[in-house]
Amino acid sequence: MSHNSQSFYGKYKAEIIAFVLGVLAIIGYMNDVNDFYNNYIKQKRAEDGLMLLNTGVSIQHVTSVFGAPIIENQRKGATEYIYSFKNFYLQVNFDKKNEVFFFAVTSKNKEFKPTIPYISRSLGQTFFDISEHYDTNFATMGSKFYAYDESIYLGNPGNYRNIYLAYNPAGVDYDRNDEYIDREHMPNPSKEISQTYRKGAKPNTFGVGEMHGSPDGREKSFGIGIEYFSSRDLPEHRY
C-alpha cells in the first residue's frame, strides 16, 4: 500500500468502517424484510385469499390471487392445481372451460383452523361438531397411511353444493388425532360405526363442490386434497 493510500486510510479509517458496517446493516435489514415478507406477508395474503375463492370462478382469478401452482395434474378433461403454503395445501380443480368445480384446503399447522364456507364452523373441531349428519363417506387404509372423507349436501343454504370433510394423511393431526375406522368396516362404514368415529376424530381438510354437483361426479376426480405421496415429494421436504 502506498504512503498516500495509508494516509487516506488512516485519516478516514473510522468513516470507512462506519460505512462498511452501515452497508452490512442495510443488507441484513433487507434480508430481514425479505424473510418477513416470505414468512408472514405471503402467508397472510394466501390465507386472506381463501376468502376470494369459490367454485364457479375462473382459474385465471385463482392464479391472480395465489400465483403459479407447485403441481399440475390432468385427467379426463380436468386439471388439478396444487399450492403449498406455510400453513396449508390448496387443491383447485377446473375444467376445459377454465371454470373451477372443486377446491380443498388441507391444514399443515395445528394452530391453523380455517373457517369452512357456508357452515360457519372451522377445522380443529370433530366431524360431528362440524356437522351432526353426513350423506356419503369413504375410508381407506394402506401400509403408509389412513384416509377418510365424507360429503354433506347443503341444499339451498349452500346454493345446492356439497361440502366435504376429510382426514388427509398429508395434513396435520389436531390434538394427536389417532382415531381411525377398522379395516373390516371399510370402505363404507355403517352409520353407527361412522358416528362413533366422527365424535372423536377431527378433519384436517375441507372441500367445496360446485352448484348441483355430486360426490359421484367429477368433484372427487383427484381425491379430497393433495395426494399423500405427492406431498412427500415436494421440494420443501427434501432439505
Image: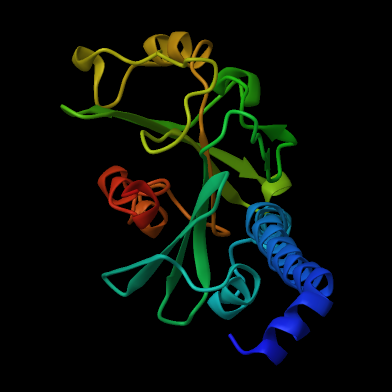
Q: Position of residue 7 (x, y in %)?
A: 76, 83
Q: Position of residue 225 (x, y in %)?
A: 42, 47
Q: Position of residue 70 (x, y in %)?
A: 41, 65
Q: How is the image coloured?
A: rainbow
Q: Quick check: 25 above or below 181? A: below
Residue under the image location 47 percent in, 82 percent down: 97
**Does residue 204 appear left or right of residue 72 in this picture?**
right
215 or 24, which lies in front?
24
Q: Quick check: 50 above or below 198? A: below
User: Image quarter for residue 14?
Assistant: bottom right
Residue under the image location 26 percent in, 12 percent down: 182
User: Image quarter for residue 56?
Assistant: bottom right
**Does residue 24 appear left or right of residue 108 in this picture?**
right
* Quarter of the image that includes the N terminus: bottom right
Residue under the image location 64 percent in, 52 percent down: 39
Residue extending furthest toward the left: 143
Q: Quick check: 65 above or below 194? A: below
Total marks shown come to 0
61 or 236, which lies in front?
236
Q: Quick check: 172 above or below 85? A: above
Residue under the image location 44 percent in, 13 percent down: 197
**Does residue 16 appear left or right of residue 86 in this picture?**
right
Q: Position of residue 31 (x, y in %)?
A: 66, 63
